[in-house]
Amino acid sequence: MNVSDTLAAWRTRRRAIDGCSIGFVPTMGALHRGHSSLVERCRGENQVVVVSIFVNPSQFNDPSDLERYPRPIHQDLALLQSLGVDEVIVPSVRELYPNGYRFRVEPHGSDLVLEGAHRPGFLQGVMTVVRKLLNLVRADHAYVGEKDYQQLKIISEMTQEFFLPTQINPCSTVREDSGLAMSSRNTLCRRRPMTRLLICSGL
Ligand code: PAF
């Protein structure tokens, strides 16, 4: 498994896999069984599996939320290796946003419902980073969970409307025995049981 932590390293790897069918799973790390299911499907349908781990600052409207977002990078890399991933991209904020947050993908006002209404800037940040990652990876297929359904819909539509060559594949939600959808943020809930309901219901 190759881990690229600079864009120069990734571009070298991208040239090496040119001509193969490429599947891509974008993540913010803190991986769980939901992510594993995306990677497993991607593994079954493509010659090369690429995963990105990037905690995207532009989709957080609360700095303390960004600060406490879990980042167990060694654990994540071990899991990805065990799943047979070929390429992992772990870019820096400086490289993905070289001029700060200067150019953005702006959703239409009619998209600002549900999570888009309650987390100002969230959809804009997601679409902007996903667009950047899709441009860098140039995958044939990308795998996105249905858990964040509005995010999935907006990514699919944005990809089509910007004529990006990647097909977005929706993947079913994986749940805990309790029925709770698996989420990286659930570890925050486990650490802070008193706030579990509050955090899990809002995020
Ligand atoms: O769902 C996520 O993990 C993130 O929103 C995504 C799609 C990786 C963009 O940062």
Image (cartoon, grey):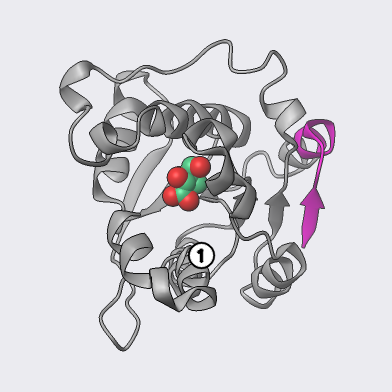
What x and y, as percent, mark residue 42? Answer: 48, 61
Find the magenta span and give its range: 1-12
What x and y, as percent, mark residue 125? Answer: 46, 29
Q: Is residue 181 magenta?
A: no
**What residue is drawn where x is 24% and y is 32%?**
117
Give the side of residue 196 with respect to residue 184, left or right: left
| Number of residues whose C-alpha sits closer than 10 Å to that of mark 1, classed few (under 14), some (14–19) or many (20 or more) | many
Give the side of residue 149 with respect to residue 26, left or right: left
What x and y, as percent, mark residue 137? Answer: 60, 37
Name the amino acid, label 1.
Val
What x and y, as percent, mark residue 58? Answer: 53, 30
Q: Nearer the viewer, residue 15 or 112?
A: 112
**What residue is drawn where x is 58% and y is 58%?**
47
Q: Is residue 42 above or below residue 56?
A: below
Q: Nearer the viewer, residue 76 or 121?
A: 121
Give the side of residue 47 with respect to residue 97, left or right: left
**What residue is drawn where x is 70% and y is 65%?**
72
Label 1 belongs to which residue? 39
Image quarter hosting the C terminus = bottom left
Q: Quadrant of residue 133?
A: top right
Q: Nearer the viewer, residue 76 or 119?
A: 119
